[in-house]
Image: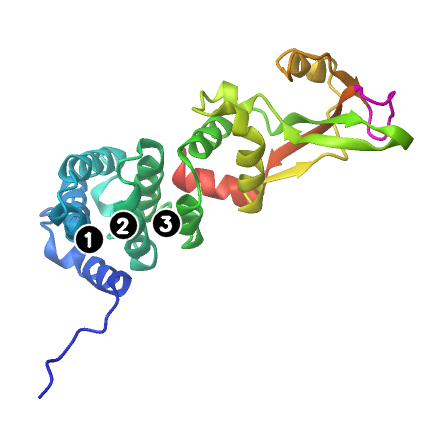
């Protein structure tokens, strides 16, 4: 007879393991939910299991797994025991699976830690969504820094400009569709890629970019213009649709803001 094989895929296996986590870890005498540290160790153990192929290849993973356990336990340390529960496997299974590839990246690991911690608290579990896992998977370290900076800002709307060069016949040649000093303020490793970062974050639905509207507060765009450098040329700030002689480098006012979906993501994964 042919040997039986296990047809369950890794994510299904992970979800099954996490679904039984609450029954396998120690519990407080006066509570039905696992303690912060034991829950952290339980998730860390599952993560170690997921990462076995990397460990077998000689990739040093245990240090980062230990960091994950410590960060997760710290994140839920002040949560009352009666508020703790094993996170929903529809979130924790894919999250741990994805984390096995990004655990060495501090910013993204912290996002997964925050998401799992939010999903482990009965008061915040409704703020989580399975889609958040896939969003984190599609972020870079720098984009995670941008989101952390946005989450800590008191501003709800941020100024931006589009940079172009005036052409014959009133046309223009786009140089940057959207530019903001946000990547500089967030200490990104590659701040020159801010256009790519903002477009990707907008694609994921976390922010909305609108270059047809602008802020009216005095001096907002003038301060922004002081930070733009394009090959040492002078850039003129213009209104939307305003023209300049051919060859002139111009910046048109615009803005972007965090969407409601983005705020929910930040509450669960960033703050």
- In screen coordinates, is 120 left or right of 36? right
Q: Earlier in the sequence, mark 1 or mark 2?
A: 1
Q: Which residues are magenta?
A: 239-248
Residue marked by disc 1: 50
Which residue reaches farthest right? 169
Q: Nearer the viewer, mark 2 or mark 3?
A: 2
Q: Position of residue 238 (x, y in %)?
A: 81, 21
Q: Nearer the viewer, mark 1 or mark 3?
A: 1
Secondary element under disc 2, as helix, strand or loop, is helix
**168 or 87: which is nearer to us?**
168
Residue marked by disc 2: 96
Q: CA distance from mark 1 to mark 3?
A: 24 Å
Is the magenta region chiefly helix, strand or loop? loop
Q: Position of residue 146 (x, y in %)?
A: 48, 29
Query: Which of the labelled discs sits on residue 125, or is there none?
Result: 3
Q: Earlier in the sequence, mark 1 or mark 3?
A: 1
**70 or 50: which is nearer to us?**
50
The answer to whether residue 2 is above or below residue 158 is: below
Decide: marks 1, 2 in contact (CB < 8 A)?
yes
- In screen coordinates, is 268 left or right of 11? right
Q: Earlier in the sequence, mark 2 or mark 3?
A: 2
The answer to whether residue 225 is above or below residue 215 is: above
């Amino acid at each position: 007879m042919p040997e039986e094989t296990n047809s369950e895929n890794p994510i299904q296996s992970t979800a099954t393991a996490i679904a039984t986590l609450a029954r396998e870890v120690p519990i407080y005498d006066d509570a039905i939910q696992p303690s912060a540290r034991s829950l952290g160790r339980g998730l860390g153990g599952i993560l170690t299991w997921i990462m076995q192929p990397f460990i077998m290849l000689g990739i040093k993973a245990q240090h980062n797994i230990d960091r994950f356990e410590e960060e997760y336990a710290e994140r839920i340390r002040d949560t009352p025991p009666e508020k703790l529960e094993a996170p929903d496997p529809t979130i924790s299974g894919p999250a741990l699976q994805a984390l096995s590839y990004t655990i060495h990246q501090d910013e993204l690991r912290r996002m997964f830690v925050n998401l799992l911690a939010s999903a482990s608290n009965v008061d915040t579990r409704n703020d989580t969504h399975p889609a958040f896992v896939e969003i984190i998977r599609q972020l870079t370290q720098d984009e995670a820094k941008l989101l952390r900076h946005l989450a800590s800002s008191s501003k709800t709307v941020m100024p931006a400009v589009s940079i172009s060069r005036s052409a014959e016949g009133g046309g223009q040649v786009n140089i940057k569709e959207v530019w903001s000093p946000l990547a500089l303020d967030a200490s990104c490793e590659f701040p020159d890629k801010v256009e790519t970062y903002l477009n990707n974050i907008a694609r994921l639905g976390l922010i909305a970019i609108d270059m047809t509207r602008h802020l009216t507060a005095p001096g907002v765009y003038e301060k922004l213009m002081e930070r733009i450098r394009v090959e040492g040329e002078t850039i003129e700030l213009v209104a939307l649709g305003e023209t300049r002689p051919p060859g002139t480098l111009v910046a048109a006012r615009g803005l972007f803001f965090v969407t409601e979906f983005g705020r929910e993501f930040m509450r669960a994964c960033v703050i």
